Amino acid sequence: MLALLALAIILNLVGLQYVIQVASEHDLEFYYTYTWHVQGNRGDYYGYSEDFSGTGHYIVDFSGNVASVVADVSWEFKAMQWGTTISSTKVSNTTSFTYNSTNGRYISGGDQEYTPVGENVWFHVPGGFSGISTCSLLDDTFTVSGESTAWAGHIMPMRGIGLVASGQYFRDDDYGQYHASYTDTYLFTQEGFLVSEIYHESDSSYPSGPVYFTLDSYLYVTQASYARNVDVATLLLAYWLPYVLLLLVVFPLYDKARWGARTIKAGGQLFKLHYSVPPELVFKIDSPYEPLMQSYLLRSRASGGFTVTASDNAGVMHGIGIVDPTEDFSTFFCTKEMLVPMMKYAGVTQAFCDAYPSSLQKIEEYDVIRVNNIQHMEISYDAGLIKPLDGKYLDPVMKMVAYEDHGKADAKLARWVKSAVKTDVAFVATAPAGSEWVVNCVSDIREQKLLPQVVDGEVIIGVGFATPSGNCAWLYGLYVHPAFRNTGMGKTLVLARLAALKEMGVEHAITEIGDWNSPAKRIYKRFETEPAGKIYFVGKKMPKVKIRRH
């Protein structure tokens, strides 16, 4: 599907050359390509063919009713017998002539191979087509057929006034003596300037006899100083409607094939993988995070993520994967036998999990701890420093988080923050930027990009998030700007979240601490905690940036 979309876009971009109106210092200027092909069918011309391709550039200046033309023309001719070239010619030349800009007849000289003084000019119909039903060009009279469409360069539908002539004549030239039947179709702008010409001719030895050869030619103006109109309706029907229809047909089939239920075997038992959550939320997952599952599902939906599950024949879920399509990693709670097939099904290469097989590389390991007896805690903190995360603080916090994780203060890299505040508890720590202690904290920072974010005179010190779920909660996403670490701000953000969770009736909370995160270990030593297990970050290879679970 992407290849088809790319092809349609490329063809449209290539076709733009036929649409763009070029600037010119002359009254009229245009470029064109001209090709024709002769194909022998029977008799003396059987197996014989000719190919001609040319380009031209015309400039026209008007003085009174006299139009002066300078034409640069280059072309290449090749004749072949049974696919073998028997002659070829390349020519470049400049032609000049004049014609009457009132009636379109030549005054002096002739256009390219034409030398018939007095005949009409082929690329210009003076006065346009208002009120006329026939038009003379060169040695033929054309019927004005009204608006029609021609495919410039075979890829861009151009709309214009159609001129059609057809008939027969007796050919007597280098090709020989034949009866010829032809159809000549021009397309002009309403003002009378050339857009395209398509010509077809069949030559035979006598009117009812076998065709000896055919001649087909195509001429398209590729650039011009005058406007040419795209047939938008045809463009949409030809390129985009088929793609949309194909998308409507193919995507559901792909979606069904990609996300259809699959059977895996883990621990000697068969399980079904689904791109959904069963209507009856029955979990049988041995994990300290089990009480948080429903809240995780709500967070996933709020952020535009999706869920994959592994269930037994009774519909009981033994594994769940929470997938954010904008990230390279996801979170899985399942047995180690289930992890790889669930990751493959979800289309991810890195995962947070509480069990993993030896086929995956352990990138980081975290201790899961439980903070107990929240309802019995005496919690106090400096409320002047802590505010709910919303409104004006959101963008600077996202920039701080992005810089901490990715080394770039690009809010888009931390878009998960915006979705997290919809469902979770989130607090931001701030202080007046001119405070003495704030100035002291940032005084040693020399690089502008390392300075903390400031909004309305308040410096952003840190942020922390929590996901409540019944009487349990998950503490995550604790960020403190490096300038303010070891100042107690991490502890203050933990206390603020625990205070909010206490008011919500939460009994205990869990969080993860990496082996490398000594500051977080010191913070949580001050609370009543106990080990609750492990969680790992695993994958096929090391990530390029630091990954935090959120």
Image: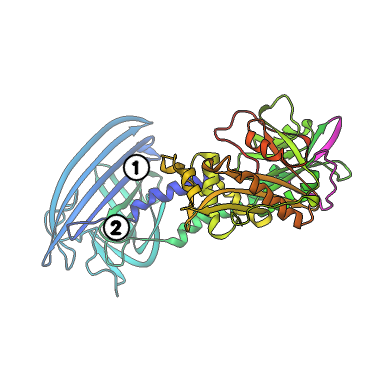
Quarter-wise, where is residue 313 in the image? top right
Residue 504: percent from left, percent from top: 76, 57
Q: How many marks?
A: 2
Residue 147: image location, x then y, percent: 38, 66
Residue 9 position (above or below residue 144): above
Amino acid under disc 1: Val
Residue extent of the magenta highlight: 267-287
Could you tell me residue 353's position as x and y percent? 72, 35
Q: Report the residue marked by disc 2.
A: 21
Q: Quadrant of the C terminus?
A: top right
Taking the magenta stretch, the answer to whether it contains residue 281 is: yes
Element class at badge 1: strand
Q: Residue at x 76, y 32 (%)?
A: 355
- Spatial CA distance of label 1 from label 2 is 33 Å
Within-10-Å neighbours for mark 1: few <14, some 14–19, many 20+: some
If you read the primary sequence from the N terminus, does the residue marked by circle 1 or circle 2 appear first?
2
SS category of the residue bearing label 2: loop
Q: In the image, what residue occupies the spot 43% across and 48% down?
A: 11
Question: Which residue was labeled with disc 1?
Answer: 38
**Of 462 and 381, the residue lying toward us:** 381
Quadrant of the image occupied by residue 39: top left
Residue 129 appearing in the image:
yes
- Secondary structure of the magenta portion, mostly? loop
Residue 373, label in figure: none
Image point (49%, 43%), residue name? 441
Closest to the camera, between mark 1 and mark 2, is 2
Q: Nearer the viewer, residue 202 or 438?
A: 438
Which amino acid, mark 2?
Answer: Gln
